[in-house]
Amino acid sequence: MVRIGIIGMGRIGKVHLTSISTRVTGAKVVAVSDPYMGDEAKALVEKYGGIKICGDYHEILSDPEIDAVLVCSSTDTHASISIEAIKAGKHVFCEKPVDLSPEKILEVGKALEGTGLKFQVGFNRRFDHNFAAARKAVEDGKIGEPQIIKITSRDPAPPDPRYIAVSGGIFLDMTIHDFDMACFLSGSEPEEIFVQSAVLIDPAIGEQGDVDTAIIVMKMKNGALAVIDNSRKSAYGYDQRAEVFGSKGAVKTSNDSLSTAVIADDNGITGEKPLYFFLERYMESFSTEMIAFVDAVENDKPVPVGIEAGLNSVRIALAAKQSVAEHRPVTL
Amino acid sequence: MVRIGIIGMGRIGKVHLTSISTRVTGAKVVAVSDPYMGDEAKALVEKYGGIKICGDYHEILSDPEIDAVLVCSSTDTHASISIEAIKAGKHVFCEKPVDLSPEKILEVGKALEGTGLKFQVGFNRRFDHNFAAARKAVEDGKIGEPQIIKITSRDPAPPDPRYIAVSGGIFLDMTIHDFDMACFLSGSEPEEIFVQSAVLIDPAIGEQGDVDTAIIVMKMKNGALAVIDNSRKSAYGYDQRAEVFGSKGAVKTSNDSLSTAVIADDNGITGEKPLYFFLERYMESFSTEMIAFVDAVENDKPVPVGIEAGLNSVRIALAAKQSVAEHRPVTL
Amino acid sequence: MVRIGIIGMGRIGKVHLTSISTRVTGAKVVAVSDPYMGDEAKALVEKYGGIKICGDYHEILSDPEIDAVLVCSSTDTHASISIEAIKAGKHVFCEKPVDLSPEKILEVGKALEGTGLKFQVGFNRRFDHNFAAARKAVEDGKIGEPQIIKITSRDPAPPDPRYIAVSGGIFLDMTIHDFDMACFLSGSEPEEIFVQSAVLIDPAIGEQGDVDTAIIVMKMKNGALAVIDNSRKSAYGYDQRAEVFGSKGAVKTSNDSLSTAVIADDNGITGEKPLYFFLERYMESFSTEMIAFVDAVENDKPVPVGIEAGLNSVRIALAAKQSVAEHRPVTL
Amino acid sequence: MVRIGIIGMGRIGKVHLTSISTRVTGAKVVAVSDPYMGDEAKALVEKYGGIKICGDYHEILSDPEIDAVLVCSSTDTHASISIEAIKAGKHVFCEKPVDLSPEKILEVGKALEGTGLKFQVGFNRRFDHNFAAARKAVEDGKIGEPQIIKITSRDPAPPDPRYIAVSGGIFLDMTIHDFDMACFLSGSEPEEIFVQSAVLIDPAIGEQGDVDTAIIVMKMKNGALAVIDNSRKSAYGYDQRAEVFGSKGAVKTSNDSLSTAVIADDNGITGEKPLYFFLERYMESFSTEMIAFVDAVENDKPVPVGIEAGLNSVRIALAAKQSVAEHRPVTL
């Protein structure tokens, strides 16, 4: 039984608490911490029972009964808390991005060296049923050598412009998942990136120095080309699709919806919109990634998404920002 | 070059004139006849050129240059004109139903005996790309032994109730195509039939002694079960689907629409309705059946849809009527 | 907090234990009983904690702390245990069929009278996301008046022929869900039924006096026609679809699969097979029906699937058997 | 009746002869010319009748009875023959590309000035049922302001490498259709283009200085972003899809296949591959564009695809080549 402490009980901390408590065999959340624990978080803690509430996350780090911590605090604290946790001998599951600066991520990597501790990054989409099936088709050789990777990733609504300032912008906040997905699906990583972007949805986003619509082209080290298209606002809801085209065929995923029901009437043949946003769409993947983390800890297996993935995705995001700033292809 | 005369220049006669003139290599319409030739028919005749207009179809039958005739007149004249044509030594393509009475169809069969002439019945749906693909899957053994055949056949709008009286009712007018399709897809014919039916669309149809909604269950001689569902009025247009379920799998067809475009918006994901009605939906199949007929005539091959198919479908339709009247399963 | 005892810890008892423990807020399983509790069941009991294991279900019935029981024992004991539970003042969730005899179900109904206790029957498919969406479309008037209901229900593999003898045959064991679904989707119940059936899969099923392939046609009291097609063995897995056609349109559901990934290669465009069998396919619906039951108990609401549904479905199944035996339409 | 001469009776000349002769009302091919008229072309000419065969296209240009010519000769002669035809007072339908050099196309434009003659460029895909439906959705405001245009265009097999040398390379030969499509769908034209490309299919293509796989990103003048992905070899056949994402929704097209039949078996649920190549896939669009051209000539309407479209597409293709050569975004 892996004993887990969760640091940070915002939206994603609560997701992990619930999925560990209800869907992950072999693990138990024994402590949570948050300087401003909300009522909803308290209710969950009470519901699942046997969980200590800590005001300060150091209580979790110093608890010898705790095997692993989930770092679900604000992004700017991910790296430092991770390092503290490693020094305290805890396995770490760290939400993405590990940090907005590659240097800090490298420091985390340094701290990990020789410890034998597990460090997994929260790229949950790799565990999603659709994307995992696409990756499996690639791995199984069903499509031959990957040549073109296409990812569509559109949010239902833009974040509050004030959030954009602290998020690091669209590439570090939103596209970072897609960068990781391009690496995951291709089994490679980019050597060059070019971004064409625009502010088409909300001028306030532009005023923050960010963009809300983008097409990103990458050349991967294995020769494949990859393209991501992003929008901060999709009228029909969360749009999350991928396609890998290769020498022997292609694999393509579609969106999930709440049901397969279609209505045929005078207007046409109408199916449901995609699931609204990431909590609905990816709920299952949050459990699956946690099962994988617990399995790595308990059975001393390699984590499926290590710190390199965390580092790569941030490096790509920063290169994307540079491509926008200098309006040219940027080599990684 | 097969020289063809068309007897009857109503809707279906014009369809055949056009498809032979534009899509059938190796055949030429050289004469047409209709006691009341409409303006549209005249315009087509002029457009394609080199076609004699006859007031009386006997002119066609007595023309030694004509190899084959298409019997596109009203149903009650199909059998007698076919017999005259056979006696005149013409190959015959006869629209369905050959007659509403099996006895008359048998007389046509008798007239054919020993003549070596071709006689094809206009069950054009066998030549439709979707249904033909389903049949091919069955023939190729892709689904193993057929066990369940399902046919959905719903019209966009009911005919004028006055037409119903002369049409012989839903089973002889509309379902007759589906009966033939059940035989075609299963490679068998029914030994028993039961009909559950209702008047749900227009009471005037009921007043004519007919029904507008029906579910028809058949046991086929090869052991398979078949079910047809019919409606005279589908709000989303012409619905023409089939499914054959067998010991190794199933094959299923969907409706055709004008384009594959789907619109995703706040209302959902909406594709186009099916093609509106049989002229749009089955236009291609009218050409394909004619190509097959011309090929049979020119190269002395067996016709793909012979008089037995014409006879069977009418017998099944009459058994269906009997099942409704006596409200019990009827053996064929 | 509704305190629940589960009587019978076979496959379905374990499903309910897991879903209540992990997905149903406001309920807790506090006791389980089974004369032959398996290892897997014991492991679950231990995992979720705080659950008493009883050898005899009377311990559950006599425990004043228990509010509700789930009757998950073998079918022949459903009715008698339900009656005992009602007499002990427990709310009851009873698996389907309540009994193979309508008389016994009526006795349960009699026992319920005037008690104010809740009694829900385990027709979980009503809570399935696809079927519920179809029903919602009907209720919302999206398709107008229902005219044709079509249900396809095919199992991936037939049961052991020895099981067939005790199951009451295909209609009481398998089609009973479809009978209930036809009532649910149409908002009505049948007044007449006719069955065309065959033994096409395994002669041993026929030797048990049962069939393995069937098409069932019903006339519903509201005038709609309904058709169910059943097979005990579908080569591509569990096939569970429905369609309701009405005066203003139609609603249709498709199968669920594990992912939306499709592979395009030289063989064609290939998507995944349906989810394998009912535990995978309907897992979510088992939670949803339990949430509804707990809600009914806790907030004194009407149960969504009452004893009438349990009674109707068995009456229809028996009429279906009679239709096969006498080979005629049977009035209910 | 528009009297037409066809100059060049290769593959596309024959397509136009057939579609005018069988599907275009109000037009008649009266003469064809080709220095090396093949047997297949001769057979068609004979079949449709009333057509003069000319060895030299000047015979066509000097025939006062001919209203319009189709320039279907080799690309390097398109511009000069077009100019001659204009000077001879003929309306011109010119296959794409009008020329590989914008200067020459401008000369054609100059020749046209003040003549009142029609000049249509053969971008047939605009007339395809799927792409036309997508454009109509945009025009009708169904998706709001276009923000992202995506075009997938993959050929089933690469051309002979020797052809590549004369074709001007992938952008002038293959992507030119996609460039025009991006303009058509967005209702705009690019102001900037960037290409990421590779040789992944056949090194011989690279040896010709060309690429076989490309992702092309454009910024359109109306602010929308566009992306095209190209491959010279798709294992599952011709892949021709488009998507336009806008402020109110998106429209998406899929590939056409020969039938809607899908086979469900132990391998999954398998539909047919796309139609094999452009003659099958776009046959209907070749007729539709010709109907539009004849309509423009006969009724003095503006042509739907004028010389500007021919000029734009070549300019974009050349900018694409420059982007590859200089590996940077190129302004148009």
Image (cartoon, coloured by chain):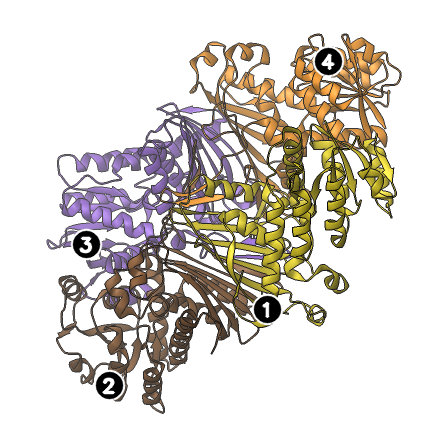
Chain colours: A brown, B orange, C purple, D yellow
Pointer 3: residues within 10 angstroms few (<14), some, or many (20+)? Answer: many
The quadrant in which the N terminus of chain D is found is: top right
* Kind of residue indicated by mark 1: Val
Q: Residues within 10 Å of mark 2 (few under 14, many from 20)?
A: some
Residue at label 4?
A: B79
Label 4 chain ID:
B
Circle 2 or circle 1, nearest the eye = 1
Disc 3 from disc 4: Cα separation: 74 Å
Determine the residue positioned at 42% across, 75% down.
A319
Nearer to us of marks 3 and 1 is 1
Pointer 3 and pointer 4: residues touching (CB < 8 Å)? no
Task: For mark 2, give the secondary structure.
Answer: helix
Residue D197, visible in the rendered structure: no
Residue at the spot of label 1: D324
Chain of the residue on which disc 2 is drawn: A
Q: Which residue is mark 3?
A: C4
| Inter-mark Cα distance, 4 to 1 | 71 Å
Q: Amino acid at mark 4?
A: Ala
The lab-note entry on whether marks 3 and 4 share a chain reads no
> Residue C308 at x, y = what percent?
27, 34
Tell me which corner region of the image, top left, top right, bottom left or bottom right, holds residue D120.
top right
Quarter of the figure with residue A70: bottom left
Q: Is residue B329 left or right of residue D168?
A: left
**What secondary structure is marked by label 4?**
helix
